[in-house]
Each structure stands twice: as C-alpha cells, then as structure tokens.
Amino acid sequence: MSRIAVLALFTVLALSPPASAEEPLPLDRIKLPPGFRIELLARIPNARAMTWGEQGTLFVGSMAEGKVYALKPGAREPVVLLRNLNRPIGVAFRQGSLYVSAVDRIVRLPGIESRLDNPPAAETVYDGLPDNNHHGGRFIGFGPDGLLYIGVGAPCNLCKRPPERFANILRMRVETAARPEPYAIGVRNTVGFDWQPGSSKLWFTDNGRDLMGDDIPPDELNRADQAGQHFGYPYCHGGDIADPEFGEERPCRQFVPPQQKLDPHVAALGMRFYRGSQFPAEYRGQIFIAEHGSWNRSKKSGYRLTLVTVQGERATGYRTFAEGWMQDEKAWGRPVDILNAPDGSLLVSDDFAGAVYRISYQTP
C-alpha cells in the first residue's frame, strides 16, 4: 500500500465514530491515581478543542461533523452554532465573541452567549490561511498579549515549505485582521498549546514525523521564549535525531530542543497547565497532555492522559496520569483536548467516543 493510501486510510479510521453514539461508555476501565474520578459531562459528536465563554458556556469544535457546539451551563445536550465548516476544530473566546478556525480561515461569532439559540452569522476575520487539509486542523488560543495564536501544520508527513506559511505557530491581531506573523517555526504539527502561569511562556505539543519506525522520533513538548525561534522540522526531530532526507542541510544544534521528549507516535494534542486548587498540590502548575494515540505503530501507543512535571520553566518528568481508553490493542476512545474548569476539575474531549469528560478529585 502506498504512503498516500496509508494516510488516506488513517484519515477514515481516525474519524470513524464508535458503532453507536448512544452506547454507554466504559468509564470504569479508566485508571486514575487514588482520589480521582472520571464522569461523562456530555455527548458531543467528534468533540475536539474546547474553550469557555464569559457566562459559563462551554464551546466545542469538531472535525468530521463540520460543526461547532455550545453547552449551556448545567445542560447535558449541546446546541449547534455553526455547520458545514471545513474542520472547525479550534475555538477561542475574547470580549464576548467566539473565534473559530476552519482550515483556511478564522471566523467570529459576536455576542454569542446572548444568542445561543439563534446564533448570528459568522464574520470572516481572516481568510488567508493555507487550504491544505493534511494537518489542516488549526488549534487557536488568545495569548496574554491579546493576540490570537494559530497552529499551522506541515501539508505532508515530511517536506520543505515556506516557513512563514507552513509548520509554524502564527499570531495575529484580530481587531485589525492584519496578516498573521510567524511566532514559532519548524513546528511540524501542533494541536495544543498554553501559556505558563507566571512566566507567560508559550508551551506546545508537536507531533513527530511518521515512517521512521516504531520508536523514533518522539513527539515533543516545547517552550517558545520569543518570536522567531526554530524547533527543527524538517531537519531535526526530538532535538537530536537528524532527518534521513533533510538532516544534512542543517545540524540539530541550530534548533531549540524540546523541553520534554514524549513517547513516539502518541499523537500528543491538547495540553494545559493545571490552574485550579481542587487537585493535590503536586499537580498545581503542572502540564496535562491528551495523547490521541498512534495509527501506524506495530504496537499502539498513547490513548491516555499524561502529566509533565515542571520546576520553574523546565520540564522535569513525564508519566501516565489516566489510561484505559484502549484495551488489547482496541480503542474505544481517543483524548483530544484538556480544559481547566472553574471548580478546579479538568475537562477532557474525546472525538472518537464523541464525549466530554470531567475529572475531579476528592480526598480518599
């Protein structure tokens, strides 16, 4: 089977939902540290990135459905805000407006929380993003500087493309809709980032390239300290693995190495610093990562939540926090994004099971 055929098959499998969206989910299979529990918050088809509104509305993007959803406070059933967008996975909220990423554009729904049952027409903020569907799901978020940050993946497994257009994290001022500028380059595909409380440094996951074997390269957790830093793609992977095709052009020492090497092919997506106080002190200020799961590894990896411990501005460790979405090489769920909840719990989206979960802690 050709590489193109393999990638096409992966796309179908990755987006295929379970047999029935109404089937009970086997949450009793999820293993968590003592004192933690997981529960179903809502069923939302192909749930991807999440964000909060100012009035407690949970907004959720999707991909296969082409829809954007809202879950009102206390509700169990979502309402549909937008339809027929091209992979609207990214959602971000600012000053009363919901911003949504499609593959080639950013749109805005102004004053949305007062019009959830009768949403306004989407306004196009910027329509100059690449229209390639490969790695075309754009995670977005507003930084402490008030700018909108946009992840733009490489349009391939491995290729060289203009760094101002592909394999980067862009940022833009939505008030003027000026052309976005690259903030970080050499980023193969990030689908999750967050700013560290206190330092306001941008941390982000990055998916390593495929077709180099089961055990290389690793996925990455990176930290960007300033605009213009290069994180290696397509020349170097994991900070010290020269690419067999492009590695001779530029050595690894020229690039910013990852803060933490993650397991290979786990498809690390959403990541957040834990900002609450409900969890024990050892979890506060630490990083939770949603590992969506491998697709071309002989023994599957990922399909779990992991924890990266941080001291100051340095990663110090990496371990499993929650697992059980896969048994005997068969997955019934795939974590995508993580979101701090106002009560100190964590929300986790799952596009495969079509669900949003809530993880909470109670002293054992």
Image (cartoon, rainbow, N blue to C red):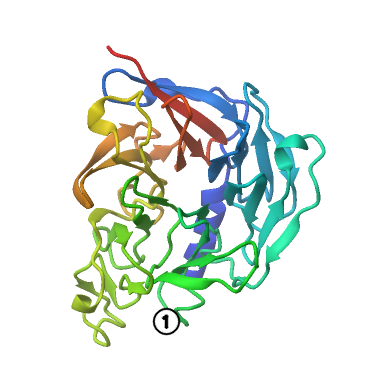
x, y percent for residue 236: 27, 74
* Nearest the eye: 311 or 315: 311
* Nearest the eye: 309 or 83: 309
**Residue appearing at x 42%, y 79% in the figure:** 159
Residue 339 lies, with reference to residue 299, above or below; the image says: above
Secondary structure at numbered mark 1? loop
Residue furthest out toward the bottom: 249
Q: Which residue is mark 1?
A: 160
- What is the count of numbered marks? 1
* Nearest the eye: 232 or 302: 232
Q: Which quarter of the figure has residue 304?
A: top left
Residue 306 lies, with reference to residue 101, above or below; the image says: above
Tell me the amino acid under the disc marked 1.
Answer: Lys
Taking the image as shown, residue 253 lies to the left or right of residue 61, namely left
x, y percent for residue 242: 23, 76
* Nearest the eye: 13 or 35: 35
Query: From the image, which quarter does the C terminus lie in?
Result: top left
Residue 11 lies, with reference to residue 289, above or below; the image says: below
**Is residue 156 shown to the viewer in this render?**
no
Q: Residues within 10 Å of mark 1 (few under 14, many from 20)?
A: some
Taking the image as shown, residue 65 lies to the left or right of residue 329, namely right
**Residue appearing at x 37%, y 56% in the figure:** 204
**Is residue 361 shown to the viewer in this render?**
yes
Taking the image as shown, residue 192 lies to the left or right of residue 69, namely left
